[in-house]
Amino acid sequence: MLKVRVAAIFILLATMALGYFLYVTEVPGNRFAFKLGLDLKGGTHLVYQADTSAVVSGEEADAVETLRDVVERRVNLFGVAEPLVQVDRGGVVGGGDYRLIVELPGVTDVDEAVRMIGETPLLEFKLIASGQEGAILGEGGVLNPSAFIETGLTGRFLKRAQLEFTSNAQAALTEPIVRIDFDAEGAKLFATITGNNIGRQLAIFLDGQLQSSPVIRDRIEGGSAIISGGFTPDEAKALVRNLNYGALPLPIALESTQTIGATLGDEALAAGLFAGIVGLLAVALFMVLWYRLPGLVAVLALISYILIMLAIFKLIPVTLTAAGLAGFILSIGLAVDANILIAERMKEELRGGKKPGDAIHAGFGRAWTSIRDSNVTHILAGIILFWFGTSLIEGFALVLVVGTLVSMLSAISISRTFLLALGIKENKGMIGFLMKSGFNR
Amino acid sequence: MHIIRNRNLYFILPGALVAVSLIVILIFGLKGGVDVSGGSLLEISYETERPAVSLLKQRVSVLPLGEVHIQPTGDAGYIVRARNLNPEEKAALLQTLMVEGTTLHEERFTSIGPTIGKELRDKAWIAVGLVSLAIISYIAFAFRHVSEPVASWKYGLVAIATLLHDILIPMGLFAVLGEVRGAEVDSLFIVALLTILGISVNDTIVVFDRIRENLRFNKDHKIREQFETVVGKSIDQTITRSINTSLTVIIVLLALFFLGPESTKNFALTLTIGMIAGTYSSIFLASPLLVVWEKVSRRT
């Protein structure tokens, strides 16, 4: 008896401590403050399709990872708080396409955002097919794609770019050029390409535009190349900056855009919280009115459930979206299900003539199989939903799975501790009334 | 016992609802939202009074954007739907909607390419299949020791049949709502259906669990009782908790529907209808169907 009472007091204190933690960490800038999704605080969600067709097969994942790093660097330059850039693989049904998901909280000017990401230059080196030197421009001055051979050397291998000026004493005019240094892998590739193709032209493309196509005179070791092409100093400076911020290793195409204004997000958050509080109060009222004492204990367990869940959201951290919030509110209604099953079972045991203490034990024990079976189906559905989900739905699925696990803990261990700690011995009078339920007096 | 004895009476309502749902789904179809079918959606609000729809339609018609739907929302806003738009096209659209003398705010914009929508639809079907399969397998496993007089996999199959009823009714409702009010089926709707599958099977499991317990009790105590009687007793014993467990969920869903964010209203509605259908089916459909199956297989 003493043991359960100590445990019950411990749970009460722990719950209060949890509440205190939730309260004090909810200040701006705290690393445990709630993370809100774009649909609750406003922002932009972009999905890009990465074109990996030019990448050697087997290296797509690496190339896309590099792309991600580059875009992330660019996004960080915007000064957006907590941007998210992640790679998403289409999976079985998606045909295995790679996608890049960019989330920019607080940015609602999508055009500006897209421009900033898309401004990143795509640098490519292509060999001109032998005999095609005169045919690089097709009809109407359009580039003839069949004249160029992919080399696999792209901005992905870029280490850095530098602005230089040619020292052409004769012309007395210095022309700005851009000197690029490849990383070790790129240098090796560059040496091989130049070594094998002496006498041919290597075309340098920027964003699909032919910049220059110098003739390869010698094998170039050391991994440096020069891009010249009649730049003005300003153009060259911008190019160097953009290349250093990150040349995109792969072409990307904007597939979908979602922007949510900050007002709409705030309204959604306020409405979600209000609905949650009203829902909680209504469930609590129902539980206390119908199940009386076990109902009150269930409400205490429900409150600890909510606090534990909120703490988990902060600690993992889980990004809260409107769907996630809906899932959490739904889980409040689900969390007391186990308590209902237990309370009903206890009532049966009491009716069967058991003493309150034994009835509590039997109620928890016998209700367990149906609680387990029904919770397993929640978890199964949650896991499949998680797989199904886009980032907005994953939050919902996560809440469902974690909520089911936590509610099993709260409904079973916490309520049992509280009920046993009350130390009910006789099922008579006031206690008898409190242990009954519904319309029974 | 009343429920089992009059089971055919209780089959009428769900039978009729499922039939009607199937018919309206076939006739009207479900209207896919932007994230499921691709396309774009722009929500705007005007600071003072909003211009007339006809004026905006006329202005937008000169843009090469294909078919554009403009529909009022709130007090001073519009929702504009069109095909998938790139940033330039969207900028042009916004510019056009900015009628002289008004101040316009962009509330939200969504533009989804066709491949993502298709992927989502494919995934949805697979997910529904997987959830159903997982539930059948789990029930068959959990009830594996119960093979007399009804095999454990039959419990699983009956559970799935009732689940089908639980999701067909909200689907039928949305087919009708789509026709009369333009309600759309988005990815959250699919999530709601999957959630109904996971949750509404609970009540069914509670009754099945009780049948399992009563069968075991009878076996241990060498009591011979008709399957029909056992099932009837089990339903009577569990009906209060079946209703109450659903009721708490419906309470929070109603709070979410009436007070919650606009974006999850349809989600809450779908789940509420699914939960009501699920509660009904777990009491009046699932276990009675087991009895029918047992009777049929005994006869043959």
Image (cartoon, coloured by chain):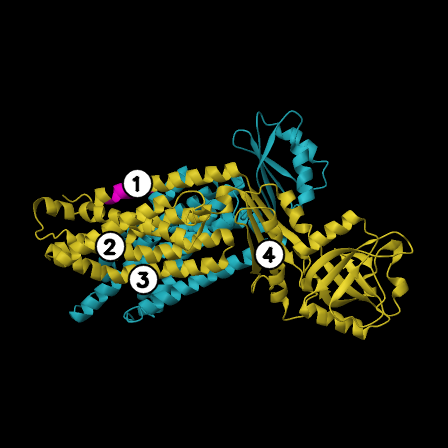
Chain colours: A yellow, B cyan
Q: Distance between the residues labelled 4 and 2?
A: 44 Å
Q: Quadrant of the C terminus of chain B?
A: bottom left
Q: How far apart are marks 4 and 1 (CA)?
A: 43 Å
Tag 2 residue: A414
Region of the chain picked out in magenta, as a range: A280-287
Is residue A210 one of those drawn in magenta?
A: no
Location of residue A437 in the rendering, given as x and y in whole percent from the top left corner: 18, 46
Q: What residue type is labelled 1?
A: Ala
Which numbered disc, 2 or 1, marks the residue that appears first in the sequence? 1
| Mark 3 surroundings within 10 Å by alpha-carbon count, few (fewer than 14), some (14 through 19), many (20 or more) | some
| Mark 2 surroundings within 10 Å by alpha-carbon count, few (fewer than 14), some (14 through 19), many (20 or more) | many
Position of B23 with respect to B288 (left or right) is right
Q: Quadrant of the N terminus of chain B?
A: bottom left
Which numbered disc, 1 or 3, marks the residue that appears first in the sequence? 1
Query: Are discs 3 and 4 both within one chain?
Result: yes
Q: Residue furthest front?
A: A169
Secondary structure beneath dot 1 equals helix
Q: How far apart are marks 3 and 2 (CA)?
A: 20 Å
Say the numbered circle drawn on residue A100. Answer: 4
Say the numbered circle drawn on residue A282. Answer: 1
Q: Distance between the residues labelled 3 and 4?
A: 39 Å
Q: Given this view, does label 4 or label 1 mark the residue nearer the observer?
A: 4
